[in-house]
Amino acid sequence: MLTILTIAAMAAALAIGLAANHYRRRRAPEDADEETAPISDLISPLETLAVLLVAFVIVVAAESFGTAGQAVGAEAHRVDQLYEVADYAPEPQRERIQADAVCYARAILAYEWPQMDKNGEKAPEVSVWSSDFRRHFKELARTDAGTLDLLVDADDERSVARQTRLSEAAPAIPPVVYWFMVVALAATIGAFAFGLPARRGPSHLVLLFVLAGLFTGSLLLIEDIDRPFSGQIHVSSTAMEDTVADIGEDFAADHPGRPLPCDAHGARMSAGPEPGRTGAPVPRALGSPDSARP
């Protein structure tokens, strides 16, 4: 809808400018070229304002897009690191933390990623595993404080990366700024069309339409990259997908025959043995997201 409104605004500005130019030229004498200079003087500052505004907004949107991509890569790396550091922990915490890492990564892809186009809402199916990490860390604190420090650091960085990813899902450009920019560019296009000389050739119209197309393309580009997880140009989930495949294979090799406490989508199983504890029931996935951090 936003894309359609943007295109319509630019097309309307171009049409109104051309119509106003035609009306002005019909009412003015053929040799009234003295009007050209004052019109150019008025268009010049408007053009400067529009170009500077577009440049500023593109930089802001691009920075947000880049930060979102970095957060996705950092989160995937920290989950993989959490799994690897858990290798130094004693059993049964080793298996439990590694199992939770696999389930966490699966839940990100299945539950939280589809919600990234809704301003980054948290998925409780993911947060239940981050809460599990800290529960296992408390158990580990009584036996191996050295490994615990490494695990806590990796988990803290994972938490920060996840929160950054969620926050960057929301548009970085406020709607009022975007629409002010649309009005500024539309006014610039309309002014250029209105100021076309009476003795204009095809080149004038070609350049006018090229300029209108570039301005419209700039607006559409900004609108697209300002939604880093749902636009045509978007941050992909490849990094987390690779992590899921990697640590999933590692878990099968490290703990042959041991089941994960989640299904293929990362949702906690309603019942079954907890990794590292034979016959112990696994709680149902009805917990709310961790209030302290994701």
Image (tube, helix red, strand yellow):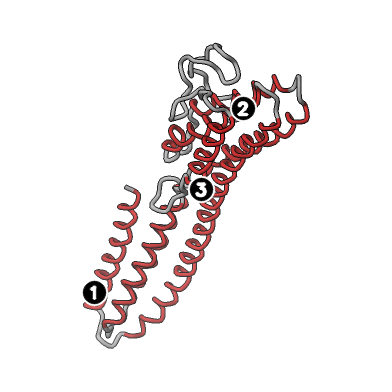
- Residue 22 is labelled as 1
Residue mark closest to the camera, 2 vs 3 = 2
Look at the picture and state if 187 lies above or below 66: below
Q: What element carries label 3?
A: loop
Label 1: how many Cα within 10 Å (few below 14, some 14–19, many 20+): some
The residue sitting at 34% across, 55% down in the picture is 6
Measure the C-alpha gap from mark 2 to mark 3. 35 Å
Q: What element carries label 2?
A: helix
Is residue 186 in view from this perspective?
A: no
Looking at marks 1 and 3 on the same chain, the residue that comes earlier in the sequence is marked by 1
**Left or right for 24, reference 265:** left
Q: Which amino acid does label 2 sit on?
A: Ile
Disc 1 residue type (three-letter): His
Seen in the picture, residue 37 relative to 153 is either above or below; the reply is below
Residue at the (36%, 80%) spot, across then down: 35
Q: What residue do we see at 74% from left, 31% from top?
A: 147
Taking the image as shown, residue 57 lies to the left or right of residue 7, namely right
User: Alpha-carbon distance for marks 1 and 3?
Assistant: 40 Å
Q: In front: 205, or 26?
A: 205
Q: How crowded is mark 2: few (under 14 residues within 10 Å), some or many (20 or more)?
A: many
For mark 2, what is the residue?
97
CB under 8 Å between callouts 1 and 3?
no
Please tell me the numbered disc located at residue 172.
Answer: 3
> Which residue type does callout 3 highlight?
Ala
